[in-house]
Amino acid sequence: MIVYIPCDSAALAVGADEVALAIQAEADRRGVAIELHRNSSRGMFWLEPLVEVVTPLGRIAFGPVAEEDVASLFDADWASSHPLHLGRPEDMPYLQKQERLTFARMGITRPLSLADYEAFDGFTGLRNAIKLGPAEVVQHVLDSGLRGRGGAAFPAGIKWRTVAAAQGAQKYIVCNADEGDSGTYSDRMTMEGDPFMLVEGMAIAAVATGATQGYIYVRSEYPHAVATLCSAVELATAAGFLGDHILGSAHSFHLHVRMAAGSYVCGEETAMLESLEGKRGIVRAKPPLPALSGLFGKPTVINNVISLASVPIILARGAAHYRDFGVGRSRGTLPIQLAGNVKHGGLIEKAFGVTLRELIFDFGGGSATGRPIKAVQVGGPLGAYVPESQWDIPLDYEAYAAVGAVVGHGGIVVHDDTANMARLARHAMEFCAIESCGKCTPCRIGSTRGVEVIDRIRSGENQPQQVKLLRDLCDTMVHGSLCAMGGMTPFPVLSALNHYPQDFGLAAPVQLAV
């Protein structure tokens, strides 16, 4: 009997290791021969630990499984009569309704098995890239419409083309894996569950640009991801997918894993470069752009995990295959992370164009408390709070920008009607004050003053003037900050003020402004 149990951090947090030990012990006690494999998570976190057994009908899932359930599962011979029986995962509506391109292997393969990875199209993209050559690879990425999945949504192919054309004896590929936004975990799932996909994406970027060195900058709170990546790099190097003359070609690429400095602002690309160079993580003024003068002053491609992990399928199946998903200028799919006060939180990969209402209710099942949902924050702690009147807007970079919101990294945090939006707005300003690198005045001082002004509004002190002052302050932060830390902090503040004025103690809606 072959049994699969995820080794993803989310599964470990709810007892996956203990369940694995209990299954092995019970099998030994009964004299049942089993193969116990630790796979990646499928992203249905409310069902973790999700245990799957191989049958003539395919893999059959049971969950959520606790240690005390193990004996009864053996008693029932892992049959459909058991209360935890879920059937084949691919038949479950939650997965059936998704378009899994980047996450196609997630939950199926073992993270550090090169054989598993290659059995599901792994390294096909890299082999094709070597055959095509740098210029054609860049053109494929351009034609696919892939935009950075880290939040800024800048076309990935333009970055690559700029670095490819830049003069420099040394070029770098840097993966920004400092995933610090609340409610986000797609980077972590990729690094822990399908690390060779990221390795392959970075190797393809190296072929396209002539880079020979690469770094993955992983947040310090992800020890499992760091360990898995280090092992994946060693295995890929030993197999010839990294190192000198990858796959026998003229291209060489050496990849290194670095643990981040534990600072939120190091998720900003230039602060990350400072940290990688061993300096304090503070934002650099631009220009020069990192593509021309990045790590150690050399031309550098900087993309986040999902951006780079999306590249292998583009090179394996062609730019048109990827581009045919999505809407408008938002092409391909986005791994959406549903969290907060929601019944079924987890990873949902959908083509751009899906709505919040679909995500919250068709996938998420509504609030975990059963209470009405009041607000949904999209795009991390610096993303806007989206009211119900905007839940039917297609998830699309331009459509969200038109209403003062951001798609960001695809993190969605749900709040029910007990949430106080004024307190959440205050938290955004306070978060900025704590995490600011301090280099620019609008962010450093503006966030501190923002906390004070919100407190005065909530206390009823001279509200009309204080509301105007808060708006002026937000305008200064948006247009005067060096980076998105200060430039985006007003998004949650203004959206809370615009759509939920009653939570600030305001008698009537205030004039909308961004």
Image: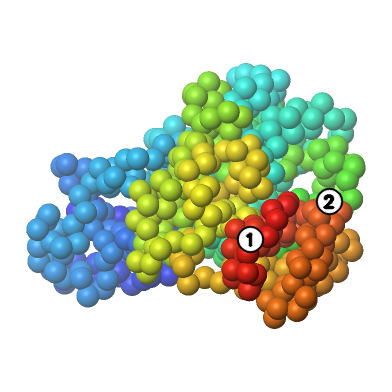
Could you tell me residue 188's position as x and y percent? Answer: 54, 56
Could you say whether the residue bearing mark 2 is in a helix, strand or loop? helix
Residue that carries the numbered disc 2 in the rendered image: 479
Q: Is residue 238 visible?
A: no
Q: How is the image coloured?
A: rainbow
For the residues labelled 1 and 2, say whether their Cβ atoms are less than 8 Å apart. no
Q: Nearer the viewer, residue 279 or 81?
A: 81
Could you tell me residue 93's position as x and y percent? Answer: 29, 45
| Residue 509 badge | 1
Of badges 1 and 2, nearer the viewer stands: 1
The amino acid on which the numbered mark 2 sits, given as a three-letter code, is His
Check the image and name the residue furthest to the front: 508
Q: Nearer the viewer, residue 354 or 167?
A: 354
Q: Nearer the viewer, residue 313 or 492?
A: 492
Residue at image x 51%, y 49%?
Answer: 389
C-alpha distance separating marks 1 and 2: 25 Å
Residue at image x 42%, y 53%?
Answer: 360
Could you say whether the residue bearing mark 1 is in a helix, strand or loop? loop
Q: Quadrant of residue 147?
A: top right
Q: Residues within 10 Å of mark 1 (few under 14, many from 20)?
A: few
Could you tell me residue 57's position as x and y percent? Answer: 17, 41
Could you tell me residue 170's position as x and y percent? Answer: 83, 38
Residue at image x 72%, y 68%?
Answer: 429
Q: Nearer the viewer, residue 499 or 41?
A: 499
- Identify whether 102 is placed above or below 436: above
Tell me which label, 1 or 2, sits earlier in the chain: 2
Q: Is residue 136 visible?
A: yes
Residue at image x 74%, y 72%?
Answer: 463
Q: Residues within 10 Å of mark 2 (few under 14, many from 20)?
A: few
